[in-house]
Image (cartoon, rainbow, N blue to C red):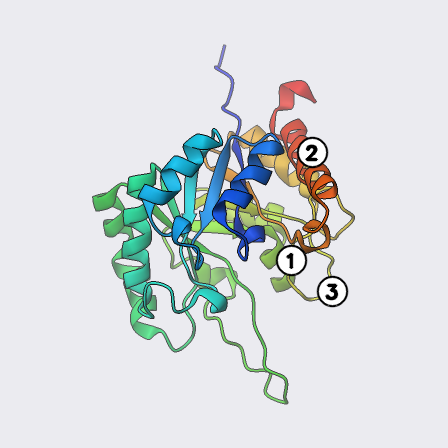
Amino acid sequence: MNPPKPSPKLIFSTAPFFRKPLREAFHHIASAGFDSVEVMVTKDPSTQEAHLMNPLAEEFGLTIEAVHAPFLLITRRIWGSEPTGKIYRAVQLAEEAGASLVVVHQPYRWQVRFQRWIESDLEAFCARTGVTVGVENMFPVRVRGEFGLRFHAGQEVEDLERFPYLVLDTSHAAVSGLDIRDFYQQHRDRIQHVHLSNNAGKGWDSHLPVYQEGVLPIAEFLDDLAADGFAGAVSIELDLRPWLQDEDALHEVMTRNREFCERRLQPATR
């Protein structure tokens, strides 16, 4: 008799609280019943220094599974402007926090050296450090005008094949027109981590709650991960702005997301 496959690890990202202190994010995440987190590096020093982050995690009974390096436009000045420098700092933070994965964004078209480094050096770098650096699928960002200029490089599936480790963001995939179930099946050997949310299907990155009506087959996708014994973490990453001013409503939506995912990720309980 074959042993049962492990259930994917369900965690919650601090990204929705990027303008809030890390303590507040940890409070809401723990209160909603999560025991593990992905920490997005922001202007808050507690997200940048392990000696500040680790005591907070211990206080709220949380383990840090992943670190999201500061690759957003709003965090572009954190840890300098050189992408590889940001990665080195994020990996060091992950090592000190006990996290096994760092999330980074795809290079912009003008970041040729960064693109080459990811393609040629990233895999060996991960092997040396013991921390996996996963490249997150992004989507075209267009400037208004007749040219429709695309900023992010590597939007097509064949371009993503050049990266050794991937982070699948389901909302980004929807904006790019990717089928998340097919994408997972095609790239399962390199997908190390999932950013999970639904999408409204209106051409923008909506990061809806997983149970909310949208265009993505979230339940079936989670079934796929569970049946496959996906070894990475599933990190719920939502736009929580509609609920941030109402603590009870915020607690309810976060808890409902957790319960929805737990039901799908544990086949024996369905």
Q: Say which residue appears at 37% left-offset and 64% top-offset.
A: 78
Give how far across and how far down residue 45 sits, in percent.
39, 53
Q: Is any atom of residue 1 visible in this view? A: yes
Q: Say which residue appears at 59% left-offset and 77% top-offset.
A: 142
Q: Residue furthest bottom?
A: 146
Q: Amino acid at mark 2?
A: Phe
Could you say whether the residue bearing mark 3 is in a helix, strand or loop?
Answer: loop
Q: Is residue 263 left or right of residue 229?
A: right
Please, is residue 2 above or below residue 136 in the view?
A: above
| Residue placed under numbered mark 1 in the picture | 174
Residues under labels 3 and 1: Cα distance? 9 Å
Give how far across and how far down residue 27 sits, in percent.
55, 38
**2 and 3 marks in contact (CB < 8 Å):** no
| Residue placed under numbered mark 3 in the picture | 202
**3 and 1 marks in contact (CB < 8 Å):** no
Between 151 and 189, the one nearer to me in the picture: 151
Q: Residues within 10 Å of mark 1 (few under 14, many from 20)?
A: many
Q: Amino acid at mark 3?
A: Lys
* Mark seen at residue 260: 2
Question: Closer to the N terminus: mark 2 or mark 3?
Answer: 3
Q: Is any atom of residue 190 visible in this view? A: no
